[in-house]
Amino acid sequence: MGWIILIVGLLLVGGVMDFIARKRNIKIDPEEGAKNVSDSERIYVETYMHSTKQNHDNIPFL
């Protein structure tokens, strides 16, 4: 029962934040944050994502 309340609460918080962003006409661009990332951080994140994908592909379904 607690999980349901938590999920509904998170959805409500997201909905309220989205409503406020639309009302204030705030534009959220994911590419904007990627402009200020150093090369080493970008390589680290891409390596981590690649290894996570490989680990996920090797786990058989039970």
Image (spheres, rainbow, N blue to C red):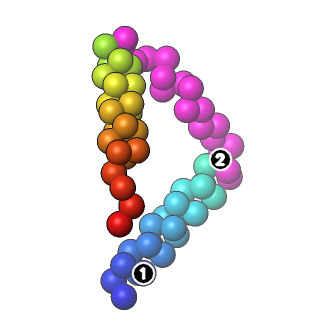
Q: Which residue is mark 1?
A: 4
37 in the magenta segment: yes
Is residue 45 something that shows in the picture?
A: no
Residue under the point 48% across and 26% down: 33
Can you tell which of label 2 and label 1 is closer to the viewer?
A: 1
At label 2, the amino acid type is: Arg
Residue under the point 60% across and 55% down: 18
Q: Secondary structure at mark 1?
A: helix
15 in the magenta segment: no
Image quarter in which the C terminus is found: bottom left
Q: Which residues are magenta?
A: 22-39
Contact? badges 2 and 1 (CB < 8 Å):
no
Q: Which residue is mark 2?
A: 24
Q: Is residue 32 above or below residue 23?
A: above
Residue 19 % position (x, y): 63, 58
The mark nearer the N terminus, 2 or 1, is 1
Answer left or right for 54 relative to 21.
left
Residue 43 % position (x, y): 35, 18
Residue under the point 65% across and 47% down: 24
Residue 42 % position (x, y): 38, 19
Q: Is residue 37 above or below residue 30?
A: above
